[in-house]
Amino acid sequence: GMWTVRHILGKPNANPDPSTCLGVFGLSLYTTERDLREVFSRHGPLAGVNVVYDQRTGRSRGFAFVYYERIDDSKEAMERANGMELDGRRIRVDYSITKRAHTPTPGIYMGRPTHSGGGGSSSGGGSSSRRGRDRDSHYDRGYERYDRYDEYDYRYRSVIV
DNA sequence: GTTGAGCGTT
């Protein structure tokens, strides 16, 4: 069917650098972190395993992240587990592009503030009663947190189960 | 228990 075409055309992201974090794709919806731990720990001690779930349905989104302690183990696992069959699926394994889970999106307005400083000509004609000053400070604080958060090493938060 | 090429929530 059409999917063969997509299989040919669809191109994964270009060669990520070797990393202790592996992305595992094409998983069965029924593959659990436990299953992955079982398979991937064969190549070395793991620092963590993370299946990505859909928040609404609670179901797996079909991919996961596996963290190794050592990059040599990660390399070996990448080569050997890529293409293996797991729970009826050919899984694909590669070094992860991202390092860690996204920081949860703040529940506040993320749009660019409409020029609260100078001119005085409001461009968009948005809600006029809003005080840009307060909103801006919240906005900035949020961003600061976001940046600091991003620098945490995964192991700081990971709990070996 | 779907379906099929890809990067993250607590």
Image (tube, coloured by chain):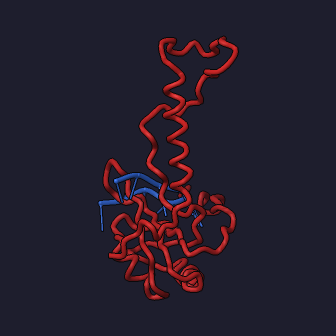
Look at 44% across and 88% down and name the residue there. Answer: A42
Q: Looking at this view, is A160 or A90 the one in front?
A: A160
**Placement of A13 over or under A115, stated as above or below:** below
Quarter residue A99 falls in = bottom right
Q: Is residue A2 left or right of residue A65?
A: right
Q: Is residue A128 left or right of residue A60?
A: right
Q: Looking at this view, is A14 or A101 the one in front?
A: A101
The quadrant the C terminus of chain A occupies is bottom left
User: Chain in blue?
Assistant: B
Look at 61% across and 22% down and name the residue there. Answer: A114
**Placement of A135 over or under A80, stated as above or below:** above
**Shade representing chain A:** red
Residue A106 picture location, percent across and down: 45, 41
Residue A146 picture location, percent across and down: 52, 48
Residue A21 picture location, percent across and down: 54, 71
Look at 57% across and 61% down and name the residue there. Answer: A98
Residue A92 picture location, percent across and down: 53, 71
Quarter residue A124 falls in = top right
Look at 34% across and 70% down and name the residue there. Answer: A32
Q: Looking at this view, is A17 or A149 the one in front?
A: A149
The mark tally for this picture is: 0
